[in-house]
Amino acid sequence: MIELSLREVRAGYGPVQVLHGISLDVPAGALTALLGPNGAGKTTTLSVVAGLLPLRSGRIEWAGGDAARLSPDARARSGMLLVPERRGIFTTMSVRDNLEIFAAGSTDLSPAYDAFPVLAQRSTQEAGSLSGGEQQMLAMSRALLRRPRLLLLDEISFGLAPRVTRQLFEVVGELVRSGTTVVLVEQYLSDALRLADVVYVLARGEIAFAGEPGELEGRALPGYVSLHS
């Protein structure tokens, strides 16, 4: 079953076109990795799916209909959640206040504290004073507290220590096992291929590869930094 489908999607910023007619399918309840170097169009793809950037042409099908007809808020209310590269936390508020906002009325913050015990220790601390890894844990907690139908993750490992990255990917794996459909954007492979069911590689706004992770072994891809980074 396909959860999300993009067909001949074109998008960009001002006069610059970034996506040149990409098509991809995201299976329900699986992890789809969207890989590629800087400037390939990965973040633009997530922005279009989330409704933060308008389509120039093409179609996005999600939840049984045309997603382009839905506002970003409507997509969020229907179960779509984007965790952006810049984390999207409220830096001047406490960790607990952030979690309470993410929980949208629920008083049970234990899923976040159980996954990331350091957040319980820092609960009264301003989010902006956390380390980069702790801020990313806080951002990921939104997914744990909301349990979205479709989770879009943009470069969650960027600039983080391997230990923190492994912890974050363990949570991603748990979300997939619980039934959440995940689209994971990464520049470097790290643990992405270990978790991925389907892989797309973008290069200059076009699909350079589509298939299963094992099919990438030994393959040279245009514009890609390294298949073994």
Image (cartoon, rainbow, N blue to C red):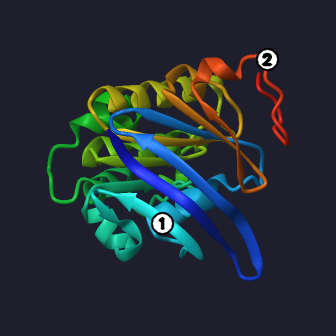
* Residue 153 picture location, percent across and down: 50, 46
Q: Amino acid at mark 2?
A: Gly
SS type, badge 1: strand
* Residue 179 picture location, percent across and down: 27, 33
**Quadrant of res 177:** top left
* Upstream in sequence: badge 2 or badge 1: 1
- The numbered dot on residue 162 is none
43 sits to left or right of 179: right
Residue designated by label 2: 218
Q: Residue at x 67, y 29 (%)?
A: 189
Residue 92 shows up from this direction: no
Up/down of 135 relative to 174, above or below:
below
Q: Nearer the viewer, residue 192 or 125?
A: 192
Tell me the CA gap for discs 2 and 1: 33 Å
- Few, some or many residues within 10 Å of mark 1 (<14, 14–19, 20+): some
Q: Amino acid at mark 1?
A: Arg
Residue designated by label 1: 59
Q: Residue at x 25, y 35 (%)?
A: 111
